[in-house]
Amino acid sequence: MKIECIKDKLMEGIAKADRLTGKNLSLPILSCVDIKTAKNSIVIRATNLDCGIEIRIPAKVEIEGEIALQGAVLNSLLSGLPKEKNIVLQSKDGNVLVSTSTNTTLIKTFSPDDFPTIPKLETQRTIEISPKLLVKGFKSVVYSASVSTVKPELSSVYVYKDGADLVFVSTDSFRLAEKRVRVKETLDFPSVIIPGKNVGDIIRTLENVTDDIKALFDRNQIAFEGKDIYLMSRVVDATFPDYKQIIPKVFVTEVVLLKQDLMDSLKTSHVFSDKFNQVNIKALPSKKSFIISTRNNDVGEYTNAIDSSVTGQDLDINFNHKYLSDCFQSIDSDSLSISISGANKPLVMRGVSDKSFTYLVMPMNR
């Protein structure tokens, strides 16, 4: 194989693909990216068997072929050549020569014959959708997915169609995030459960894509295909919890305040929180006050009254401050509402001017 391409394009493609690689003692080839020649281009591939990616970049192909190498090694080399514009890759005796106008480096390669096939979905279930909408939906909820894979559906993001909304949901059973994104009512998007770690790869891959992409579905996989990019993910074969039944419909206390004020207070309270990340919230309509407080016997105490509008019953409840803080990136409004259905019951946060996002947090035991 011998090809010449633009260095920055190669670095960008390798970086995107290399995120899917990792150490695998039983299959060392999974720590590599595969580079294969095509018509006036090269195709860069990577997979962890759960998620796979193909990226096509323009190239001058002098000799056809295929190589597999550790992407991080190649990108580390290329990043050290800031003045070079073009790069030449040439396979030689089980290695690859990386050449520029001033530099020649030899990198060990692996047999591309061992590289797994990335499945191409043969399906008629295909739709076109904006990658911007997908990224917004996934980003708004993925942090609420469980880090444990004991229950795969809880470590995933559930996506389904509801009227003119595409709904993204995740929960680890301690908190729940739901984001609704407006789409065409005729859009035929089937319900899918996508592993949370794959959602991270989807976000990173699609967040800079501007043109509409195709989403392809079959029983076991979902794929996203755009100009010069193809990303495939396994889907979870499970039933997502009936989450709507746990979102309260009646509230006894309502608080409206500036998002930035709550963010600042929770950030400071973290310094004084205990090992359980516990923060106390007092919503006191009788005193027209909303108070955040934390206490750590080894550090000290923190109390802050936040300017707010408080109505309903007086409540005194403890929550995990990290769970409260995680959702701010998903709320587009400058002001937010906190609705509580009673003592030792969950709170629900929403933007005042944007009801497309709902966030529920369970209370902590004292």
Image (cartoon, rainbow, N blue to C red):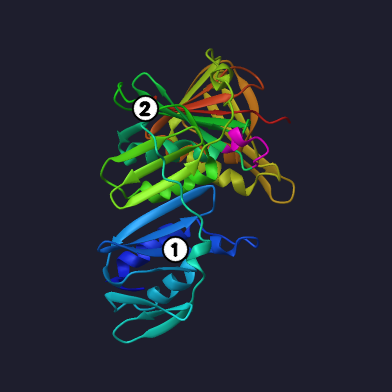
**Which quadrant, please, contains the N terminus?**
bottom left
Residue 273 is situated, as x and y percent measured from the top left of the image, at 66, 44
Magenta residues (range)? 148-155
Give the class, few, some or many, for how many residues have Cα within 10 Å of label 1's Cα (few <14, many ≥20).
many
Dot in front, 1 or 2: 1
Please state which of residues 226 and 326 is positioned toward the viewer in this rendering: 226
Q: Is residue 4 left or right of residue 221?
A: left
Please state which of residues 259 and 205 is positioned toward the viewer in this rendering: 205
Q: Is residue 349 left or right of residue 163?
A: right
Q: Is residue 132 magenta?
A: no
Query: Is residue 32 at all visible to an observer of this figure?
Result: no
- What amino acid is found at the position of numbered circle 2 in the picture? Asp
Residue 347 is situated, as x and y percent measured from the top left of the image, at 56, 25
Q: Mark 2 falls on what kind of element?
A: loop
Can you identify the residue that label 2 sits on? 354
Q: Residue furthest top?
A: 250
Q: Mark 1 falls on what kind of element?
A: strand
Can you identify the residue that label 1 sits on? 34
Q: CA distance from mark 1 to mark 2?
A: 44 Å
Q: Which residue shows up at 49% across the image and 69% down it?
A: 70
Q: Is residue 327 above or below residue 117?
A: above
